[in-house]
Amino acid sequence: MTTCPARPTPARPEGEPVTDEHPDPPPTDDPRWRDALRAVLDDPALHALHAQPVVDLAAGTVAGYELLSRFTGPWQASPDRWFAAADRWGANAALQARVLERAVARRADLPPHTFLTVNVDPHLLADDRVADVLGQHADLSRLVLELTEHSRADDDGRTVLDRARAAGALVAMDDAGTGYAGLELLLALRPDVVKLDRALISGLDADPVKRALVQVLGDLVGRMDGWILAEGIETAAELDAVVALGVPLGQGWALGRPGPDLVTDLVPGQAAHLRATAARVSLTGAVASVVRPVAAGEDGGVRLAANGLVQQVRTRAGDWVPAMTVAPSASVVEVARRAMLRPDQQRWDPLVCTDANGAVVGVVDLDRVMLALSDEGPDAIVR
């Protein structure tokens, strides 16, 4: 669940009125929260829902949205703080039922082929106000119920959840990877979408252990026929690392901030970058992953014949030699075999990678092929 961080609460005498000089919220057990929550429930205009895009990282398109609460009140407080106070003062079910009702209605505004995610506390599923919103709709397709606690719903709540799934709703599990309780719930719930916690995504690009854990979770969820979603992606480096790991869905400020409108496009250039990065990942094990991009011509190191076909390639020693061409999708194993079948004096000459139209993609150095081959493991040699 992506929310704004809560601000620290300064010391203030109990019962002192909140003024412009004291805009920070009191503790959640302060009775003034009861009045603030009553005002929000009485006036829906004080409780807005903003949508943050969820992105298909391989296609570079918006796949869905998460609805996030934004409250107007007498002090500055994060949505988490409001819901914690609502839980303390018995208003949480009413608030979450309102969010669900709005989410179900807002599906009519969704762009084609997108979904809407909404947060629900598992312990509130059996509450009549929440259950009634879900139960009165025969079609809940394009709605994703994101369970926000590492606790199981009781039997009545599980029945409500099962009925919602039967009506077409999907189930997402929040904050995966944060402890054994979360993994235990993951196995019991078998969610359709598993959201990776921000703590796991933060600094992912510089932490090989985190990357390994993301791969393990991705394999596990994939075996359950589910999807993983990396939330809280804040930097370009984190985004590239997530895409490189093959994570299908992403969310965070690096992709789009929450807002009142349903954003349909990413920032200029980002979609193309995502598609290019994902394409390179899909060709892992193919020679495209080790190509050194160059342009055709003397300066680029690839000579063309009069008919435009590749003729020669320049070696690192500066010599021009006959060029062997390979396709981007060719496996590094097959390319290594072809190269080693050349005469002794040509075996270590670079290759030229060309696309389906014969255009030069780049040069393939044999040392990089050998390194890629070593990553494939010893079994690759005998395949």
Image (cartoon, grey):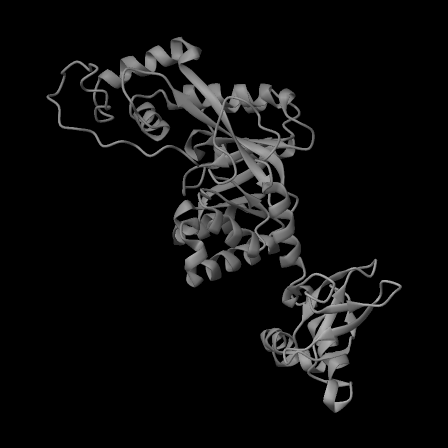
> Which residue is at a point 57% across and 35% down the rendered structure image?
267
Q: Residue furthest right?
A: 307
Picture coordinates of residue 283, whole percent (x, y): 67, 61
Q: Horizontally, is 17 left or right of 110 in the view?
A: left
* Of 209 and 274, the residue lying toward us: 274
Picture coordinates of residue 244, whole percent (x, y): 56, 56
Picture coordinates of residue 209, whole percent (x, y): 42, 62
Q: Which quadrant of the view contains residue 75? A: top left
Quadrant location, the N terminus: top left
Q: Horizontally, is 171 left or right of 127 in the view?
A: right
> Which residue is at a point 44% across and 54% down the rendered structure image?
204
* Of 97 and 217, the residue lying toward us: 217
Q: Is residue 354 visible in this depiction of the protein?
A: yes
Q: Is residue 129 visible in this depiction of the protein?
A: no
> Which residue is at a point 39% across and 8% down the rendered structure image?
42
Q: Residue furthest left?
A: 13
Indicate whether 231 appears above or below 183: above
Indicate whether 240 appears above or below 302: above
Q: Residue furthest bottom?
A: 344
Q: Horizontally, is 229 left or right of 308 in the view?
A: left
Q: Which quadrant of the view contains residue 368? A: bottom right
Q: Horizontally, is 103 left or right of 207 in the view?
A: right
Q: Which quadrant of the view contains residue 88? A: top left
Picture coordinates of residue 56, whole percent (x, y): 61, 42
Quadrant location, the C terminus: bottom right
Q: Residue furthest front?
A: 298
> Which residue is at a point 37% across and 32% down the rendered structure image?
4
* Of 364 and 282, the residue lying toward us: 364
